[in-house]
Image: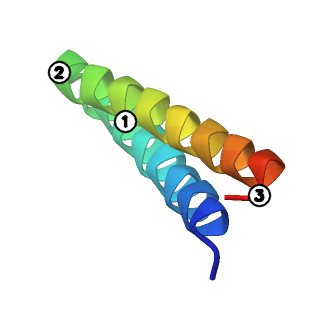
Amino acid sequence: MKSSTKDQAAGTAKVIAGDLKELTGKVIGNPGLQAKGKAEQAVGHTQKKVGEIKKVLGV
């Protein structure tokens, strides 16, 4: 698997994990967990973009 594809897959996994953390934080009333979820989503979106850029550049 190319590194661009790995970055995109890992980024998607982080976004999903972040969504779950944020939702869990909302349900149980834990703003800290919500914040961690949002942060993980941001990292995931960034990693997906890195993968997209690598794909365009052929890296």
Q: Is residue 43 left or right of residue 15?
A: left
Q: Which residue is mark 3?
A: 58
Image quarter of the C terminus? bottom right
Q: Is residue 53 above or below residue 6?
A: above
Near mark 3 (Cα within 10 A), the count class, few <14, some 14-19 or many ≥20, is: few
Q: Which residue is mark 1?
A: 40
As helix, strand or loop, the secondary structure at mark 2 comes to: helix
Residue in view at x 35 percent, y 25 percent: 39
Report x, y in % for residue 26. Answer: 36, 26
Q: Earlier in the sequence, mark 3 or mark 1?
A: 1
Q: Are marks 2 and 1 in contact (CB under 8 Å)?
A: no
Residue in view at x 59 percent, y 41 percent: 50
Choose between 35 and 4: the one closer to the eye.
4
Name the disc covering residue 32, or none: 2
Q: Is residue 51 visible?
A: yes
Report x, y in % for residue 36. Answer: 26, 29
- Cα–Cα gap, marks 2 and 1: 12 Å
Q: Are marks 2 and 3 in contact (CB under 8 Å)?
A: no
